[in-house]
Image: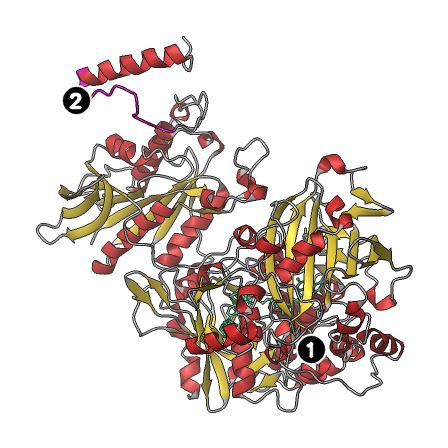
């Protein structure tokens, strides 16, 4: 039996853009696009449900941060098999970048674990697994999941697409398949754990008719900034250091460029940052 | 099936023990509505309004009766991903039935595009236009609404939800549950989400109402199974194809409209046309082989609905209504309207136009049929919405009477014959009586020889001098390629015939993209051929009509074989009705598949 959280987001259906949904200036007219369950989050939910299929006593809570309308996807999750849904919604959360979003979600997770330590096994609300999609189709950053893991101080397995075993060796051990560029990695990890799920994972089961009938009126808690005891300075626009200067569509080509390889050490990362900064100054993208 | 079987309602609540398996896969209702179109939604809203009023009257001690508990007992299933996703129509709505169920609909935000203030009928030749000086009374639309059916249905679904009707979108009824000559409900679609298979549910009810729209799969099955069309004319259909354009604002002379000749186009305006491109020129007076017409309805936000409707009885094996619509738009007048406009939506659906003598028996044990599925459509006006809705009202009243009689305490499917009586006394019957011979004459051709017949009918409330006209199934009407049919166009594909500029002439596949149709590719094709060998015969005799008539280019002839791109399908049902060898089987695909209309 596991206590599972799924982080999900409602996104505009960017795959389905037709005339009316694009403004003349080429930006997306969000209001006209149908809002959907972020596809990889749905696959994350399915992975959680597969755990519950095996351990039926497990409990799945789905958390989403968004406007009131995002309650739709929580219902979707209930209809497919989740136990609870929580909507985190407040004006002060608006225009959050990934840092502010992951902070807010972390606070929500802490609240859900009864304000106790979400990781302390003796806390009966302690969390075992957090599933989220690798990335949302409206931003494609893939940062929120890993940041939540960092905030909570728990390990993470990113790009997972299959659970190989769970609880077979030890109750708190799980083995996952990770999808990397051209290899599949087999990882064994210790719970509590955060897992981000890619699009090669199983697709979500359909919503169940009986659940739809009887859960359609279930009350879904809506939590505001105070409910999750979040600090306003770290939420929404205020808590978002990211500044978008410009959006370009970039086509990468290595032809005619000299390439360099950097090791993953702090020193060489510093060096890389310096080079990039210099180049951005040169092209005028970054002003002093 | 016995009484206990249908009454074990407690296990309805057992949703949490659900594992996808075979047990617990049955759910019980009093009333199950199949198809979330205007007919069934009207029924649901009206019936629950009646029950709510009844229960309120009891509390206020106005009447002494037992309250009716319908919680989780009245459900409506819709195969589209949302309510409204499969809804497409012209559409001009005569609000007569809407006024009865929700008189204050406008205050409640009912989505109308415009109220009709001005209307015209044009006869087109290939270059010119002739405006009818007077509009026949039955075609008058002043005060009616122009609506987008998908918006309207999505709004009605919200009203039904507020009335506590169980709304189940993305659920298709795929099979009738029949036992002992009684209908006990339907089975829902299985899902294949590789590698898993999720079986459907058995939804059981004491009355199942089929409001599946034109040529419904379960409706046809029920009619056949219970012999409901005995001694009736066979159903016949038209195919309607529609595009939505966003007009160029710069071209507007004022806020509302553009001027074309002496005609203004814009919200509040509707235009119907006859003639070009279906039949023009002298030769068509004798041999006009295509019949139908086109429409232009001004919508809100500077949009224009532009559509073409053609009888499927057409003898020409190369009939392609999508192409006719493109031809129509090339008319100099229409080109002017569409100058710098942009196409933003597309869709297609069939319309049952056979009229009064094709209406099957509409009730049986546990069954009622309403709306387009019952062939309730006034072919003179191309209007079915108000009749579909009115049939929903009548069915609701019949079912409410059933509740008052405590019918639903006693679990056996009943035959609500009273529904047909109500229908005969309603304006539905009256309207359909007047147009009982219209379609048959129409398809003979306008202006000749159908024109004079229609003239007589209009003056005599539908009497036809040559006797009540018979119909023949549409697929039997296609003639082989070596027999002449009018001014046959040799080029089957719009791409060859006229250059696609993607402004006026839109390629079929571009249009299909705008319908946003898609089907999960994990499933097997929902369209199959009975016998591939028959197609080879068909290639020689008819030149594969499916490759032309399908408005979504689902069929393609490749290396002497038909390939079926089922993912493109718009669920219009045309292929089921028009393959000359009746070689196509159209089944219901997994729910959620199909078009995703929003403004159509
Ligand atoms: C191009 C065109 C123009 C038209 N113009 C006008 C007009 O101007 N004015 C007018 O009054 N009428 C017009 N009509 C006719 C009008 O649209 C129909 O009469 C009306 O939509 C019928 O309503 P309905 O509820 O019977 O069926 P539909 O509107 O067809 O609804 C049936 C619904 O049932 C669903 N369904 C079907 N089978 C199943 C199943 N087995 N399981 C689950 N769901 C199922 C379908 O997805 C659909 O949503 C037009 C039609 C067309 C095609
Ligand atoms: S499917 Fe029908 S119309 Fe198409 S080629 Fe075969 S027989 Fe002819
Ligand atoms: S395949 Fe048949 S039902 Fe589908 S769009 Fe083509 S003609 Fe219509």
Q: Position of residue A154 (x, y in %)?
A: 20, 35
Image check: A82 left or right of A13?
A: left
Image check: A62 left or right of B273?
A: left
| Front residue (pair B499, A193) | B499
Q: Position of residue B367 (x, y in %)?
A: 56, 82
Name which residue lies at 78% across and 49% down. Answer: B333
B464 drawn magenta: no
Instruction: Report the magenta stretch's main SS.
Output: loop
Q: How many labels, in total?
A: 2
Image check: B390 left or right of A214?
A: right
In this picture, is A125 found above or below A224? below
**Disc 1 element:** loop
Q: CA distance from mark 2 to mark 1?
A: 76 Å
Name which residue lies at 46% across and 42% down. Answer: A14
Span of residues in magenta:
A251-267
**Disc 2 element:** loop
Chain of the residue that carries numbered disc 1 in the rendered image: B
Residue B112 visible to an observer of this rendering = no
Which residue of the protein is positioned furthest toward the right in this rendering?
A: B133
Chain of the residue that carries numbered disc 2 in the rendered image: A
Q: Report which quarter residue B551 is drawn in.
A: bottom right
Mark 1 = which residue? B354
Mark 2 = which residue? A263
The 10 Å Cα crowd at callout 2, few under 14, some 14 to 19, many 20 or more, is few
């Amino acid at each position: 039996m596991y206590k599972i959280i799924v982080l999900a987001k409602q996104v505009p259906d960017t795959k389905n853009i037709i005339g009316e949904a694009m403004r003349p200036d080429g930006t997306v007219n969000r209001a006209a696009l149908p809002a959907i369950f972020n596809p990889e989050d749905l696959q994350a939910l399915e992975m959680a449900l597969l755990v519950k299929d095996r351990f039926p006593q497990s409990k799945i809570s789905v958390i989403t941060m968004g406007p009131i309308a995002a309650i739709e996807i929580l219902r979707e999750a209930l209809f497919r098999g989740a136990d609870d849904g929580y909507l985190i919604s407040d004006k002060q959360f608006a225009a959050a970048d990934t840092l502010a979003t992951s902070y807010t979600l972390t606070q929500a997770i802490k609240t859900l674990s009864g304000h106790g330590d979400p990781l302390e096994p003796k806390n009966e609300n302690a969390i075992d697994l957090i599933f989220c999609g690798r990335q949302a189709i409206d931003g494609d950053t893939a940062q929120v999941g890993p940041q939540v893991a960092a905030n909570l101080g728990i390990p993470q397995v990113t790009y997972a697409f299959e659970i190989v075993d769970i609880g077979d060796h030890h109750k708190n051990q799980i083995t996952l398949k990770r999808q990397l560029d051209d290899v599949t990695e087999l990882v064994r990890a210790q719970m509590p754990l955060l897992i981000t799920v890619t699009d090669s994972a199983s697709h979500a089961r359909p919503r169940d008719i009986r659940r739809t009938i009887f859960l359609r009126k279930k009350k879904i808690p809506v939590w505001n900034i105070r409910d999750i005891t979040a600090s306003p300075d770290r939420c929404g626009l205020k808590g978002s250091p990211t500044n978008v200067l410009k959006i370009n569509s970039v086509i990468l080509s290595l032809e005619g460029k000299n390439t360099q390889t950097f090791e993953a050490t702090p020193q060489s990362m510093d060096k890389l940052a310096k080079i990039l900064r210099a180049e951005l100054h040169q092209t005028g993208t970054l002003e002093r | 099936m016995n009484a206990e079987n249908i009454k074990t309602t407690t296990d309805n609540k057992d949703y949490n023990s659900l594992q996808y398996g075979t047990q617990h896969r049955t759910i019980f209702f009093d009333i199950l509505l199949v198809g979330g179109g205007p007919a069934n939604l009207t029924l649901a809203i009206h019936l629950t309004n009646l029950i709510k009023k009844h229960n309120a009257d009891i509390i206020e001690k106005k009447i002494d009766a037992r309250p009716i508990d319908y919680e989780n007992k009245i459900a409506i299933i819709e195969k589209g991903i949302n309510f409204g996703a499969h809804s497409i129509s012209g559409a001009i709505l005569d609000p007569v039935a809407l006024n009865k169920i929700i008189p204050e609909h406008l205050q409640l935000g009912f989505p109308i595009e415009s109220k009709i203030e001005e209307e015209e009928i044009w006869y087109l030749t290939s270059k010119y236009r002739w405006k009818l000086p007077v509009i026949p009374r039955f075609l008058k639309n002043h005060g009616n609404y122009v609506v987008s059916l998908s918006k309207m249905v999505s709004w009605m679904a919200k009203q039904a939800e507020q009335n506590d009707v169980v709304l189940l979108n993305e659920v298709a009824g795929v099979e009738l549950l029949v036992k002992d000559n009684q209908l006990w409900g339907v089975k829902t679609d299985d899902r294949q989400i590789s590698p898993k298979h999720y079986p459907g549910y058995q939804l059981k009810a004491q009355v199942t109402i089929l409001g599946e729209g034109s040529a419904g799969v379960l409706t046809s099955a029920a009619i056949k199974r219970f012999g409901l069309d005995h001694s009736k004319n066979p159903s016949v259909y038209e195919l309607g194809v529609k595009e939505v354009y966003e007009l160029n604002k710069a071209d507007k002379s004022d806020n509302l409209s553009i001027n074309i000749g002496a005609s203004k186009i814009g919200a509040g305006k509707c235009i119907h046309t006859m003639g070009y491109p279906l039949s023009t020129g002298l030769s068509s007076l004798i041999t006009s082989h295509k019949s139908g017409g086109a429409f232009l309805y001004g919508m809100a936000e500077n949009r224009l609905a532009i559509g073409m409707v053609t009888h499927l009885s057409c003898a020409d094996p190369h009939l392609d209504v999508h192409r006719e619509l493109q031809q129509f738009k090339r008319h100099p007048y229409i080109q002017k309207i569409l100058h710098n406009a942009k196409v933003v939506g597309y869709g297609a659906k069939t319309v049952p136009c056979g009229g009064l003598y094709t209406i099957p028996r509409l009730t049986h044990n546990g069954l009622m049929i309403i709306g387009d599925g019952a062939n309730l459509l006034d072919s003179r006006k191309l209007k079915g919405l108000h009749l579909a809705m009115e049939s929903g009202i009548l069915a609701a009243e019949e079912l409410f009477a059933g509740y008052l009689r405590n019918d639903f305490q006693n679990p056996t499917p009943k035959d609500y014959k009273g529904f047909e009586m109500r229908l005969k006394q309603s304006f539905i019957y009256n309207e359909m009586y007047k147009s009982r011979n219209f379609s048959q004459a129409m398809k003979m051709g306008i202006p000749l020889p159908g024109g004079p017949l229609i003239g007589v009918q209009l003056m005599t409330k539908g009497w036809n001098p040559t006797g009540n006209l018979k119909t023949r199934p549409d697929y039997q009407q296609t003639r082989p390629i070596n027999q002449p049919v009018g001014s046959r166009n040799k080029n089957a594909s719009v791409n060859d015939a006229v250059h696609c500029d993607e402004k006026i002439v839109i390629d079929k596949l571009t249009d299909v993209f705008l319908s946003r149709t898609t089907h999960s590719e994990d499933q097997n094709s929902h369209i199959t051929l009975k016998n591939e060998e028959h197609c080879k015969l068909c290639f020689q005799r008819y030149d594969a009509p499916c490759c032309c008539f399908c408005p979504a280019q689902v069929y393609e002839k490749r290396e002497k074989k038909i390939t079926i791109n089922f993912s493109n399908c718009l669920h219009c049902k045309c292929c089921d009705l028009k393959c000359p060898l009746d070689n196509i089987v159209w089944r219901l695909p997994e729910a959620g598949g199909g078009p995703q209309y929003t403004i159509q």
